[in-house]
Amino acid sequence: MADYLSLWWMWICIALVVGLIELLAPGFIFLGFALGALVMAAVVFVVPGLSVPVMLALFAILSLIAWIVLRQVFRRQSSGARIVTRDINEN
């Protein structure tokens, strides 16, 4: 397993699989993990000699940061729903 996690394209495959899981169960939870895995692909490509515990810890930190950023970005968007305070049938 350690040999596979040191390959950058394996992190891209993990990102794609977790992204597909996000399509099946939407909620921006798995999207944070997918973005973390995608950034890990770039990190492993640039710094190939990382140990497995360091890679997994970095993946967890990057996924948490991605999840927090996604919550902040999508919290600002309004759903467009109006709050009705008066019924049009009341006189």
Image (cartoon, rainbow, N blue to C red):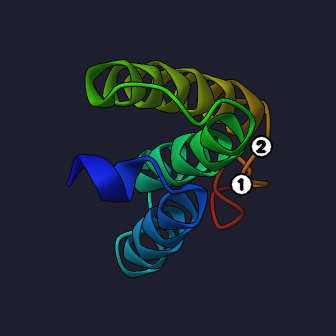
Q: Say what amino acid the circle numbered 2 marks.
A: Ser
Judge from the rendering whether residue 48 lies leftward or rightward of residue 53; answer left or right: right
Q: Are marks 2 and 1 in contact (CB under 8 Å)?
A: yes
Question: Which of label 2 and label 1 is nearer to you?
Answer: 2
Closer to the camera, 28 or 17?
Answer: 17
Numbered disc 2: secondary structure = loop
Numbered disc 1: secondary structure = loop
**Residue denoted by label 1:** 81
In the rendered image, residue 34, in percent from the top left (x then y), is placed at: 52, 54
Closer to the camera, 48 or 64?
Answer: 48
Q: Residue at x 37, y 50 (%)?
A: 5
Closer to the camera, 14 or 25?
Answer: 14
Q: Residue at x 63, y 57 (%)?
A: 90
Q: Residue at x 52, y 29 (%)?
A: 49
In the rendered image, residue 53, in percent from the top left (x then y), is placed at: 26, 22
Label 1 crowd bin: few (<14), some (14–19), many (20+), radius 10 Å: few
Q: Say what amino acid the circle numbered 1 marks.
A: Ala
Mark seen at residue 78: 2
Q: Residue at x 47, y 25 (%)?
A: 50
Image quadrant holding the N terminus, namely bottom left
Above or below, 50 relative to 26: above
